[in-house]
Image (cartoon, helix red, strand yellow):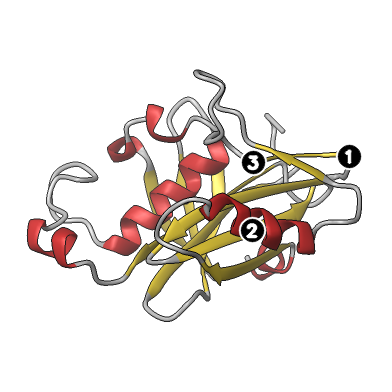
Amino acid sequence: MTPARSIVDVAWAEVPPRPPRREHAWRLLTGMLPAGAELSNACSRCGGPHGPVIVSRAPFIASVTYAGGYAIVAVAASRDAAALGVDAEPEHDVRRDAAGMAGVLGDGEATVRDWVRVEAALKADGRGLRVEPATVVVSAAAGGWTAAVPDGEVYIGWDAPGPPGILVSVAVLSPQSPAA
């Protein structure tokens, strides 16, 4: 699984607690993409600026997430990955920790790391939380993990370095996958 890690660049920056968080993420992405690349993220359901990131005018794909005062972005060349998702959560959150994670991913207790892996795969899938997170099957694999998304694909994933106290996971779909 090590080669997959080398095809994705991950970066982060601190952002203010209120908008325009997206501007900080866009600045990071612009610095990682070739000159002339354009970014958009219109929601397919309502048209608002909160859908998956689309890169045009450059053969790249990108994903963005926000956690604990940070914007975290991931970028890969289209020749290396057919789909990409990044997700992050604070390792500790007073409200979430008090409520617990029981039942979040089905029966039993889940961890924050479990959730971040599932979310990264669902972002790579493109349907996000329109897929029931508890139906995603995450399994250990050499050097990382895989996530099988119902009526979708099996994504290769790994836990990436991130800002202090933030758990980051990345999921990709190989361009050689049957659906890619």
The N terminus lies in which quarter of the figure? bottom right
- The reply, left or right, for residue 59 in relation to residue 146 is right
Q: Is residue 13 visible?
A: yes
Q: Quadrant of residue 88?
A: bottom left
Give the number of the mark in front: 2 or 3.
Answer: 3
Give the answer, above or below, for where 43 lies relative to 23: above
The C terminus lies in which quarter of the figure? top right
Q: Is residue 153 visible?
A: no
Residue occupied by mark 2: 74
Which is nearer the N-term, disc 1 or disc 2? 1
Given residues 52 and 118, the one toward you in this image is 52
Q: Residue at x 55, y 47 (%)?
A: 155
Label 2: how many residues lie within 10 Å, few (<14), some (14-19) or many (20+)?
many
**Which amino acid lies under the numbered mark 1 shown in the image of this protein?**
Arg
User: Does the residue at mark 3 contact the one at mark 1 (Cβ under 8 Å)?
Assistant: no
- The reply, left or right, for residue 5 in relation to residue 121 is right
Residue ranking furthest to the left: 98
Percent x, y of residue 111:
24, 61
Q: Quadrant of residue 91?
A: bottom left
Q: Which mark is residue 26?
A: none
Residue occupied by mark 3: 53
**Which amino acid lies under the numbered mark 2 shown in the image of this protein?**
Ala
